[in-house]
Amino acid sequence: MGNAWALYAHPDVTPHPLKDPSFDPLYGFPNGRKPREMIATEEQMQSAKLPLEDRGYCAHKLLEYQSCRADVWPWAAKCHHEKHDYLNCEYEDYILRLKEYEREKRLLHRKKRIEEKKVVE
């Protein structure tokens, strides 16, 4: 089921894609979680004129890739390692965001199930 349809049909158990998570990010992690940190600074991204959509957790990899391309320009294929690192970082970021969405969805289902159980009792 697509997210738009799920949000329409089941708004109580489907996380809204434009809102922050409603549960504590440390819920279910007794030892805590490693916080995600930006490696590239805002000044570096502004000086490289990165578009806003590219200013994510993988911006440092993109900056490395762009500087490599600028250094070896006619032979941009020499930067395949940097490109691979950047694309792999983007993929891992996507997977992490997908897992966060699924976690939120699972916790909303759990909350609804507990509330329904309380009503029955």
Image (cartoon, rainbow, N blue to C red):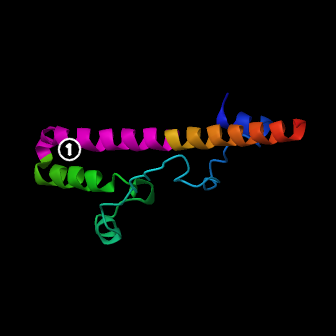
Outermost residue, top side: 1
Classified by dominant secondary structure, the portion drawn in magenta counts as helix
Q: Which image quadrant is residue 49 in?
A: bottom left
- Magenta region: 74-98
Neighbours of disc 1 within 10 Å: few (<14), some (14-19), many (20+): some
User: Residue 74's x, y, as percent?
Assistant: 12, 44
Instruction: Identify the secondary structure beneath mark 1.
Output: helix
48 on left or right of 19:
left
Residue 117 higher or lower than 51, as above or below: above
80 on left or right of 23:
left
Q: Which residue is mark 1?
A: 82
Q: Which image quadrant is residue 103 in?
A: top right
- Please, what is the three-letter code of the amino acid marked with disc 1? Glu
In front: 60, or 117? 117
User: Residue 86's x, y, as percent?
Assistant: 28, 44
**Circle count:** 1
7 on left or right of 55:
right
Outermost residue, bottom side: 43
Outermost residue, front side: 121
Q: Which residue is at a point 61% across and 53% down the rendered structure image?
A: 21
Residue 79 drawn in magenta: yes
In front: 77, or 88? 88
Residue 81 higher or lower than 48, as above or below: above
Q: Which residue is at a point 12% across and 54% down the rendered structure image?
A: 71
Q: Which residue is at a point 52% across and 53% down the rendered structure image?
A: 26
User: Residue 88's x, y, as percent?
Assistant: 31, 38
111 on left or right of 118:
left
Residue 84 drawn in magenta: yes
Q: Which residue is at a point 43% across and 51% down the rendered structure image?
A: 31
From the image, which quarter does the C terminus lie in?
top right
From the image, which quarter does the N terminus lie in?
top right
